[in-house]
Image: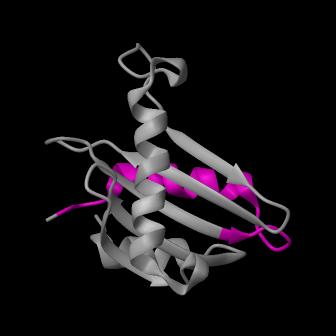
Amino acid sequence: MPGIEECLLDVMALPGARGAAVLDWVSGLALGTAGEAPEDDRETAAAETAELARLAAEHQAFGARGEFPVEDVIVTTGSDFHVLRFVETGFDSSVLIHLWLDRSHANLALARLRLRHLATELVLG
């Protein structure tokens, strides 16, 4: 079972991967990062990603408190994909994996499948 560093190395091997982070979406703190960060600012990227994740995870319009919790958040731009995969943990489940992909080289379906697998295997601590 991979830890944070192994998880990040694995996800960065995906086609089109530009950067990745494992972060606590409640506090906005990055637990680990690899590759590039949007605007070359890892702390701001982590805080802004956490804000988006909280919005999706805590609002009923997106399934919060419902039978089917949010699994992924996908943001697309003209040149990039951002995939946020929530990680279920035995404690508070406030961890996610953020993958930043170059849209022209990425396979979004493959990235989502790989992140889903890594999220179930990730060992924290």
Q: Which of 68 and 60 is in front in this view?
A: 60
Residue 32 percent across, percent down from the top left: 33, 75
Residue 96 percent across, percent down from the top left: 39, 54
Residue 103 is one of the magenta-drawn residues: yes
- The answer to whether any part of residue 118 appears in the image is no
Q: Seen from this angle, which residue lies furthest top?
A: 67
- The answer to whether any part of residue 16 appears in the image is yes
* Picture layout, residue 55 above or below residue 4: above
Q: In this view, does 91 lie to the left or right of 6?
A: left
* Picture layout, residue 35 above or below residue 52: below
Q: Nearer the viewer, residue 30 or 55?
A: 55
Q: Quadrant of the N terminus?
A: bottom left
> Image point 49% across, 47% down: which residue?
52
How many numbered discs? 0
Q: In which quarter of the image is the C terminus?
A: bottom left
* Picture layout, residue 34 above or below residue 79: below
Q: In this view, does 71 lie to the left or right of 77?
A: left
Q: What stretch is highlighted in magenta?
A: 101-124
> Image point 37% across, 65% down: which residue?
22
- The image's colouring method is one colour
Residue 26 percent across, percent down from the top left: 28, 49
Residue 61 percent across, percent down from the top left: 53, 19
Q: In this view, does 62 lie to the left or right of 75?
A: left
> Image point 34% across, 52% down: which residue?
25
> Image point 59% across, 55% down: which residue?
83
* Picture layout, residue 62 above or below residue 78: above
Residue 65 is one of the magenta-drawn residues: no
